[in-house]
Image (cartoon, helix red, strand yellow):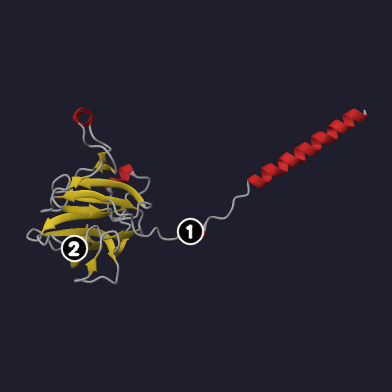
């Protein structure tokens, strides 16, 4: 009987000890306040080219959801994406496997649609409210409203790149930073242009097919100064 009582007491102590430890492990520490801070500017990363022009990632890598290419506006120029087409067809994948090329990062998606050439508009996805930075070094030569389905859908910022006076890099679907004006000098991956707008209520966004959200994004196009259209 004494042995049985001793065993019961020991089992009770063990259950209490391990039960207390389990309860303590379920208590989660408060979230770090740094998680709520802005992501800041992106690490410089070239994601597309046009001749000697290099387009840098305009949002922080921490905010990036997906990269896509589609047809831009009339007169937009075809871009050369860097990285891998994530939704390439079987024949394209076999071709790259045999002859090389088409690999590396970042991964991007061909979205289709748009009046311009298939790879003439660069859609860089991020949640609405994310900061947008200049994709090139240059000077702002225009800030105009963009009209989408009869409503103002943010602004378009036109940048004349340093060393390429015949080209204009257009960044749209953003709310412009109030400190900017025509004549402002901007630096790629450093100068904040504005923030991404939530346009999911205005149109069904093609990038949403490859993200976990509604596909909000900033749109980058390149035109010649002769073909640039003012909204």
Q: Is residue 10 above or below residue 57?
A: above
Number of labelled discs? 2
- Residue, disc 1: 34
- Residue, disc 2: 158
Give how far across and how far down residue 58 sits, in percent. Answer: 28, 56
**Circles 2 and 1: CB atoms closer than 8 Å:** no
Q: Secondary structure at mark 2?
A: strand
Give how far across and how far down residue 172 sits, in percent. Answer: 23, 59
Q: Nearer the viewer, residue 198 or 94?
A: 94
Quadrant assignment, res 140: bottom left
Q: Secondary structure at mark 1?
A: helix
Give how far across and how far down residue 1 sits, in percent. Answer: 93, 28
First in sequence, mark 2 or 1: give its number. 1
Give how far across and how far down residue 180 sits, in percent. Answer: 26, 70
Give the alpha-carbon distance from disc 2 to disc 1, as whole Å.
33 Å
Q: Nearer the viewer, residue 149 or 112?
A: 112
């Amino acid at each position: 009987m004494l042995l049985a009582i001793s065993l019961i007491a020991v089992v009770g102590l063990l259950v209490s000890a391990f039960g207390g430890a389990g309860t303590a492990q379920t208590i989660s520490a408060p979230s770090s306040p740094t998680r709520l801070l802005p992501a800041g500017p992106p690490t410089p990363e070239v994601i597309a080219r046009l001749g000697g022009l290099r387009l840098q990632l305009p949002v922080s890598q921490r905010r990036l959801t997906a990269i896509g290419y589609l047809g831009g506006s009339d007169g937009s120029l075809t871009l050369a994406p860097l990285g891998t087409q994530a939704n390439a067809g079987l024949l394209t994948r076999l071709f790259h496997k045999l002859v090389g090329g088409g690999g590396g990062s970042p991964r991007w998606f061909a979205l289709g649609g748009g009046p311009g050439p298939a790879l003439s508009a660069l859609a860089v996805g991020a949640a609405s409210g994310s900061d947008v930075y200049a994709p090139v070094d240059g000077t702002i030569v225009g800030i105009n409203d963009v009209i989408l389905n009869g409503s103002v859908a943010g602004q378009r910022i036109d940048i004349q790149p340093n060393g390429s006076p015949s080209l204009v890099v257009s960044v749209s679907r953003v709310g412009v930073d109030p400190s900017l004006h025509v004549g402002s000098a901007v630096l790629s991956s450093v100068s904040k242009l504005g923030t991404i707008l939530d346009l999911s209520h205005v149109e069904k966004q093609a990038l949403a097919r490859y993200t976990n959200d509604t596909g909000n994004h900033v749109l980058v196009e390149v035109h010649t100064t002769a073909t640039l259209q003012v909204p």
